[in-house]
Image (tube, grey):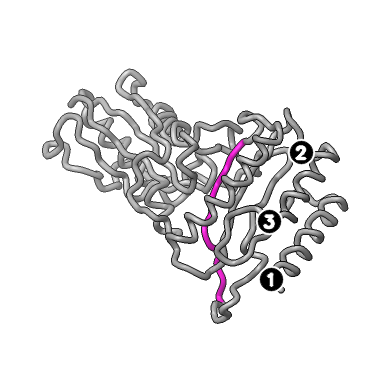
Amino acid sequence: MRYHIVMYLLLCSIASFAKGADTIKLYYPINVSAMSPASVHSIDSLIYMDVLRPGKKIGILGYADYLGSAETNITLSEARANTVKEYLLRMGLKEDDIQIVIGRGEVSRTDTNSKEGYATDRRVDIIPGGFKALPKPPVKPVAVKPDTVKPLINLQQVKKNQTIRLNRIFFYPGMHKVKEESIPVVDSLYMIMRDNPKLRIRIEGHICCVVAQNADGYDFDTQDFKLSANRAKEIYDMLADKGIDEERMEYMGFGKSKPLAWPERTEEDENMNRRVEIRVLDK
């Protein structure tokens, strides 16, 4: 019975794509990461139709339903996404063709009583053409007078090479733009730099939500795989625009190599990893 459900969903996915949908969906039985014969046939058909071909960018997103723990669902969704990636590479696509591979874990549901889960959530999405730039959300700078902002740190208590986490600097997912709520934190950092002219810092960017194979995340704003570095540079540019000498600042991206929360079970966990830290180089 489960096989027939998966087969039906796959046929619907191909029919939907033929009508102009922009995502190919491959479905899975419960707790399975291997591609079914039906999924293999679907991909083979799309390769034959030149929908998937070498030289054309694609994105691969894996999902799971709510059955199992958050941690195992992340692992399962990553395994599904990577299994599809490996098959596409064997079929002639190149590493450069695959723009991004992400395991997103379980799809959030309010009704989680069924022992069968949700068949439509156990899937991998293949996006032919890859990810296009997303519209930037409107960000209105908050007018904050620097002198009214409380300092972030007591600089006298900070040692050289010590890292300071900026807890309230948040970013839009997949983008390097700072959320409006975080502007006062940047203003406070500016005030510290302004009042301590010998202070030199390195701004260090970190990301969430990507699998280990990706050194850094994809930035929808700039359409490159430099998300953590771009986030660090965003803070760098904001401080420079306020008048801080660029010679006093450096920036660097660390990708997902230093997560604060793992596995990422909640939006709060993702926000913790999607962060910027300040390293004191000299003072």
Q: CA distance from mark 2 to mark 1?
A: 27 Å
Q: Earlier in the sequence, mark 3 or mark 1?
A: 1
Q: Would you call the spot at circle 3 few (<14 residues within 10 Å), some (14-19), or many (20 or more)?
A: some
**Residue 48 location in percent, x, y?**
83, 39
- Left or right of 46 on screen, residue 82: left
Residue on which disc 1 sits: 2
Q: Is residue 104 magenta?
A: yes
Q: Amino acid at mark 3?
A: Ser
**Residue 238 location in percent, x, y?**
43, 33
Q: Residue at x 55, y 81 (%)?
A: 113
**Residue 235 location in percent, x, y?**
41, 34
Quadrant placement of the C terminus: top left
Q: Secondary structure at mark 2?
A: loop
Q: Residue furthest bottom?
A: 113
Q: Amino acid at mark 1?
A: Arg
- Tally of numbered tags: 3
- Asked if disc 3 and disc 1 are in contact, CB closer than 8 Å, the reply is no
What stretch of residues is rendered in magenta?
Answer: 99-110
Kindly identify which numbered label has been placed on residue 151. Answer: none
Residue on which disc 3 sits: 36
- Asked if disc 2 and disc 1 are in contact, CB closer than 8 Å, the reply is no
- Left or right of 61 on screen, residue 267: left
- Left or right of 107 on screen, residue 19: right
Residue nearest the observer in this picture, 279 or 245:
279
Quadrant placement of the N terminus: bottom right
When the figure is inspected, residue 4 is found, relative to residue 82, above or below; the finding is below
Kindly identify which numbered label has been placed on residue 52. Answer: 2
Marks 2 and 3: which is nearer the front? 3
